[in-house]
Amino acid sequence: MFSRRPSGHFIKAISQANGLGPVRFVAHEAMLFGTRKSWWGGRKARPLPHEGVDLCRYYTQGGEPRSLSPGARIPVACEGRVWAVTDDDFIGRSIYVRHEGCQGVFFTVYAHVSPRTGLAEGDALVRGEVLATLADPVVRHLRISPHLHFSLMTFPDSLSRHALRWATMGAGNEVCFHDPRSLLGEDMALCEEAADSALWCCLGPVPDIS
């Protein structure tokens, strides 16, 4: 456990990386940490509690509903080093970043993304640096909105990278998931309509970061 939870302004960093201006991110309750609910398809229960938060819907300063689209830039929440890049992600890939601070060692995870060209284990990252873009579910013939899954976790450095599998991590004792809200920098308002992709427009194309 943490002596105190790590904090940050991750939502602000996403906004800045994509030139969104002042925005308000919102979430369906099934997008939040710890829930067994799902927000896509037939809304079947998740097999395990949700390991993080899903980020995709927001309102502009003028109150217009928008969504992050494939290609949206994804920054790193805190200074750290790339720990692993895995491919068991059902939409894209997952990037694990290791951080050291007064709270101890912790990891943030950015799932459903396409890593930037050349990103490799051991690479140093500064807070706010773009490490990936949002992956496109259509490429894998999936009917789900593009979204970033963001997790905060702790596990021993001795844990094999082969153990970082979404299907099994939450069932064991070595990986501990934590609510990442303290890293977001602001609360996401609950919005029942956030699960309905038909109501939300996507932002325009984002320049290539490769």
Image (spheres, rainbow, N blue to C red):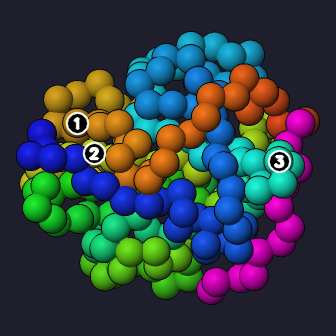
Pointer 1 with pointer 3, Cβ within 8 A: no
Q: What segment is highlighted magenta in the picture?
A: 199-210
> What crowding class fits label 2: few (fewer than 14 Cα within 10 Å), some (14-19), or many (20 or more)?
many
Q: Position of residue 74 (x, y in %)?
A: 56, 66
Residue 66 makes an appearance in the image: no
Q: Position of residue 26 (x, y in %)?
A: 65, 39
Q: Position of residue 152 (x, y in %)?
A: 33, 47
Q: Quadrant of the C terminus?
A: bottom right
Circle 1 SS class: strand
Q: Quadrant of the N terminus?
A: top left
Q: Amino acid at mark 2?
A: Met
Mark nearest the camera among 3 and 2 is 3
Residue 169 vs residue 68: left or right? left
Front one among 32 and 174: 32
Circle on res. 153: 2
Q: Position of residue 49 (x, y in %)?
A: 42, 22
Quadrant hosting residue 70? bottom right
> What crowding class fits label 3: few (fewer than 14 Cα within 10 Å), some (14-19), or many (20 or more)?
few
Circle on res. 63: 3
Looking at the image, residue 195 lies above or below residue 166: above
Disc 1 to disc 2, how far (Cα)?
A: 5 Å
